[in-house]
Amino acid sequence: MSSTAHAEHLQEPVTGIPNGKLGIWLFLASEVMLFSTLFTTYIILRVAAPEWPRGWEVLNVPLAMTNTFVLITSSVTMVLAYAKAVTREKAAFNKYLGLTIALGFVFLGIKAIEYGAKFEHRIAPSTSIFYAIYFTTTGLHGLHVIGGIIANSVLLWLSNKQWDHPLFVGRIEYAGLYWHFVDIVWIFLFPALYLL
Amino acid sequence: MADKKHSDHHQEQHWVWKYVFSVDHKVIGLQYLITSFLFLLFGFGLLMLLRWQLAYPGQPVPLFGRFLPEALAPGGVLMPHFYNALGAMHGTIMVFLGMVPLGVGGYGNYILPLQIGAPDMAFPRLNMMSYWVYVVGGILMLSSFFIPGGAAQSGWTSYPPLADISPGQTMWLVAMIFVITSSLLGSINFIVTTLNMRAQGMTLSKMPIFVWGQLVTAVLLLLAFPPLEAAAVLQVMDRVFGTSFYLPTGLVIFGQTLDVSGGGHPLLWQHLFWFLAHPEVYVLILPAIGIVAEIIANNTRKPLFGYKEIVASMLFLGVMSFLVWAHHMYLAGMSSKLSNFFLVTTLIISVPSVAILTCLILSLRGASIRYSVPMLFALAFLPLFGIGGLTGLPLGLTTTDIYLHDTYYVIGHFHYVVVTGSLIALMGGVYYWFPKWFGRRMDDFWGKVHFWGTVITMNGIFFPMFIQGLAGVQRRLYDPTAQAHNLPTQPLNVVSSVFAWLLFLAQIPFIWNFFYSMFKGKKSEENPWKATTLEWACPSPPPHGNFETPPKVYRGPYEYSVPGAKTDWTPQHVET
């Protein structure tokens, strides 16, 4: 997200916050609005529903619990990747960013198993309003995970060429902010859908 | 965005990169400007067809009727479903593909970086991407006329359950998701640019009103559009995957219970939609207010009355605009406690709007006004926007709204705000900044012809709607003569329609003037209006990178007729 098309003209960002960082925070603000809307929808639909299934009775809690740990671990490896970028340890950086990406895939894999089991039982978004909100929110979150994996993969791929680029560390930081956001959304989704 | 190109590289670039896929905010600004004017013209064309049906229901459309496909208009007579599509697409195109991209994408892109003394936007490539995502959304929206079932037919508000089951809506939703994404990317860019790229000395309190308007607008877009995006995703789920987010249990359509799981709420969409669409009103009007403020300060040759009050009012408007949405839904069946809350917030939000208008009117006091063409448009904006705003009050009051809701009165009200308000200002802006864009002047005589033709016909279209609305004529009627109580005001439909077609004629001098002056207009000096703001401190049109040396700002934006100064204008970048 950072751009330096005119870095030559520019001295310092007026606010002292780099453009890219300000941009990613604003982007996350809009993402918060997006997911808040979905959570609001969830609350409204649930409060108005005559009956609402217990998440732990119809959904696979152990799988989702595993996924929660997978995502939290990936947030840790993301932070470590950033730390290694700051301390300029390239091999360690590659290892941790690679791990983050791999954990993203693990999350998607487990999600696919979960979805697959539901489809096998002929359960789809159209089955009930509960499954409608379940598939929509987790699906949209899954798309965000895919987005994060793509961003991280591009950075890993660029790291050979751009390791010494002045903005490279910043980009890792912004990708990390986004990845943590995706993680946090899941931490809200998990109890809302599976445990409450 | 690993963009390390230096400005000089752009000079030798292929024309495709220079004019089509340019990352220069000025080129992108003009792309937005021209594209959105074309969309406005197209949306207006839909309306002209629709107005024929309203004026002469059931009669074949002259001239154009024969070109319409048999399925939509057999023998030139509009079918009801085509009429509905015209209405829905007119609203959608005018608001989302016309006015917002024009005010924000067009003016914001070109003028904002110049007025804060920046060489470009903060994220030039993202800026280019915003434009092209918008174009894709626009093309998808237009192409929906050609898909089986035709374009969306549920009004620009797309209320379910109708929108969940009527044809054409899926394309509308997909197109909207593109347009919303474009706006989100754009708004991030505008906020970062305004906060981070200001020239030395350009403190927040020295920013022109136009920049303030764009900043507040960008924040509104950033925070209000995602809920609509989420709402659109849910509607796509309903239509494509058979969910029931907006469909209640046991909904009966054509005598048959709909085969869905149910459990959803049609009202949910209305809340989510208006949570966006009320801030959207301020997205439409704040850039226009910014333009009017610039033109008025420049042509009255004195400082704006109440700069701080205008800025404070804009910020307050921005916050309050998130708390009034349900006044669009008084009749949707909400509890009276809730509607009282929204009644109060609605009346509160009228205060800053009136404050801004009052400041602008008081700015005229004691001035020797220069009646240039842009100033004519700015002067027309004041009373006409006033009419639009004041006629909104009876709609904000629950008791009067019971009668006026969904009548032509509502249509008259919001068209006075958006057309004779915003659009008039945006047209005035063309005359004001044309010398900046092309280094030439637009013709004054044809400008005045355009001005008078436009203002008179616009009032001719919209004023009769108040009378019709008070007489109880409902909006969105295919055949207004079908109900007896509509008959006494039916002649007013003819009046409105004739003025709508005249409004089209009044735009011909504008279009001709624009393109003729672009190539053959009188050459303009660098600062033809003797203006103080920074966009006039660089050559016209500005080169890539805008300013030869980064400007420094020493004073506020509107230092006109400063006692003791040599000239009656003291630009922001001039020391002493």
Image: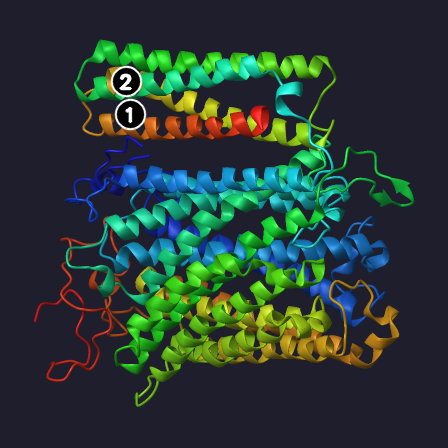
Chain bearing tag 2 is A
Q: Tell me, yes or no, whether the two marked residues, 2 and 1, touch with CB atoms within 8 Å.
A: yes
Q: Which residue is mark 1?
A: A172
- Residue hosting label 2: A81
Q: How dense is the environment of label 1, judged by Cα within 10 Å: few (below 14), some, or many (20 and up)?
A: many
Q: Element at badge 2?
A: helix
Image quadrant where one finds the N terminus of chain B: top left
Residue B367's image quarter?
bottom left
- Residue B327 location (% of width, % of height): 60, 63
- Pick the residue in front: A154 or B504: A154
Q: Are marks 2 and 1 on the same chain?
A: yes
Residue B137 appears anywhere in the view: no
Q: Does residue B459 appear in the picture of this structure?
A: yes
* Residue shown at the point (56%, 38%) measured from the top left: A38
Image quadrant in which you'd find residue A149: top left
Q: Residue B554 at x, y = what percent? A: 13, 65
Q: How is the image coloured?
A: rainbow
Disc 2 marks a residue whose amino acid type is Ala
Q: Residue at x 80, y 58 (%)?
A: B78
Counting from the top left corner in percent of width and height, residue B334 is at: 68, 58
Residue toward you, B497 or B243: B243
Q: Is B391 situated above or below A2?
A: below
